[in-house]
Image (cartoon, grey):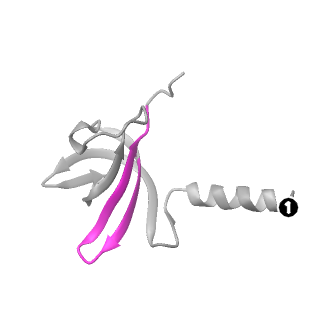
């Protein structure tokens, strides 16, 4: 039982927005407001998009950056590089959860 509780707490910790994962990845939630000059704009801040980034729509399907809903809520994972933050995963949050 104690082990189950520890695993549950660990999983919740990993899912919290703004958490820095051991590999230097950060997960956050925000409002996608645009794509400008190759940058993804979330909450007024620009992020580069990795060429290998995974982009998931609100129906849990892989899509291209041009198909992201703007404006829209997203959960995204990024890492820091010499050139600034780079998104490696971005998922749309549906306005209404599917039934």
Using the rendered view, name the quadrant where residue 63 is placed: top left
Quarter holding residue 7 = bottom right
Work out whether residue 30 or residue 37 is closer to the camera in this orientation and state it: 37
Could you tell me residue 81's position as x and y percent? 30, 74
What secondary structure is found at the residue carrying circle 1? helix
Residue denoted by label 1: 2
Outermost residue toward the left in this view: 37
The span picked out in magenta is: 75-94
**Is 88 drawn above or below residue 73 in the view shown?**
below
Query: Residue 50, percent across and down?
Result: 27, 60
Indicate the position of residue 42 as horizontal and vertical percent values.
31, 52
Instruction: Name the dominant secondary structure of the magenta segment.
Output: strand
Q: Is residue 93 magenta?
A: yes
**Image vertical order of residue 2 relative to residue 92, above or below:** below
Q: Is 60 on the left-hand or right-hand side of 69?
A: right
Q: Residue at x 35, y 50 (%)?
A: 54
Dividing the picture into quadrants, the one containing residue 3 is: bottom right
The quadrant of the image that shows the N terminus is bottom right
Number of residues whose C-alpha sits closer than 10 Å to that of mark 1, classed few (under 14), some (14–19) or many (20 or more): few
Q: With respect to residue 97, does 51 lie above or below? A: below
Give the mark count. Answer: 1
Instruction: Using the rendered image of the protein, determine whether residue 67 is visible from the camera's viewpoint.
Output: yes
């Amino acid at each position: 039982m104690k082990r189950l509780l520890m695993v549950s707490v660990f999983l919740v910790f990993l899912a919290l927005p703004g958490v820095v994962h051991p590999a230097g990845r950060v997960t956050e939630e925000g409002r996608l407001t645009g794509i400008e000059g190759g940058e993804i704009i979330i909450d007024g801040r620009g992020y580069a998009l990795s060429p290998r980034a995974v982009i998931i729509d609100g129906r849990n399907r892989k899509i291209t950056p041009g198909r992201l809903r703007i404006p829209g809520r997203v959960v995204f994972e990024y890492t820091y590089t010499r050139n600034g933050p780079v998104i490696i995963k971005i998922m749309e949050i549906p306005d209404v959860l599917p039934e």
